Image (tube, helix red, strand yellow):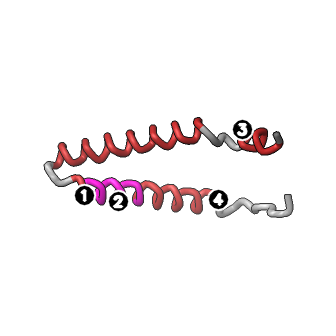
Amino acid sequence: MNSMKLLGRRGGGIGRMVSWFIRIVIYDICITGISDLLGVSRMVALFIFLGILGVISLVGYLLRNKYATGTEVDSDF
């Protein structure tokens, strides 16, 4: 019984699977759109998509470090 409560609190089960499938469909739509728009194969579109995600995450990392330099993080919760 405790494992069922824990599983429900973590968001596991069917909800996690549905979320995973929705992400896959969105990624597939993006890759197909890039492939059709640029006229390249799906493999090249996949690398372009991963490059775009990499640039977005790099910009987010740099912005976070730029604006968080003056704050101290207390790790003694």
Q: Residue at x 58, y 57 (%)?
A: 64
Please, what secondary structure does the residue beneath circle 4 have? loop
- Tell which circle, 2 or 3, labels the residue nearer the N-terminal end: 3
Specify which label sits upstream in the sequence, 1 or 2: 1
Dots 4, 3 in contact, CB < 8 A: no
Extreme-left residue of the structure: 39
Residue type indicated by callout 2:
Gly
Dot 4 corresponds to which residue?
68
Cα distance, mark 1 to mark 3? 37 Å
Look at the numbered discs 1 and 2 and tell me whether their residues touch, using CB distance below 8 Å: no
Give the spatial CA distance, label 4 vs label 3: 35 Å
* Residue 61 magenta: no
Residue 23 at what x, y percent from top left? 45, 42
Q: Residue at x 37, y 45 (%)?
A: 27
- What is the span of residues highlighted in magenta in the rendered image? 45-54
Q: Quadrant of residue 74?
A: bottom right
Label 2 element class? helix
- The residue singled out by tag 3 in the image is 8
User: Which mark is first along the chain, 3 or 1?
Assistant: 3
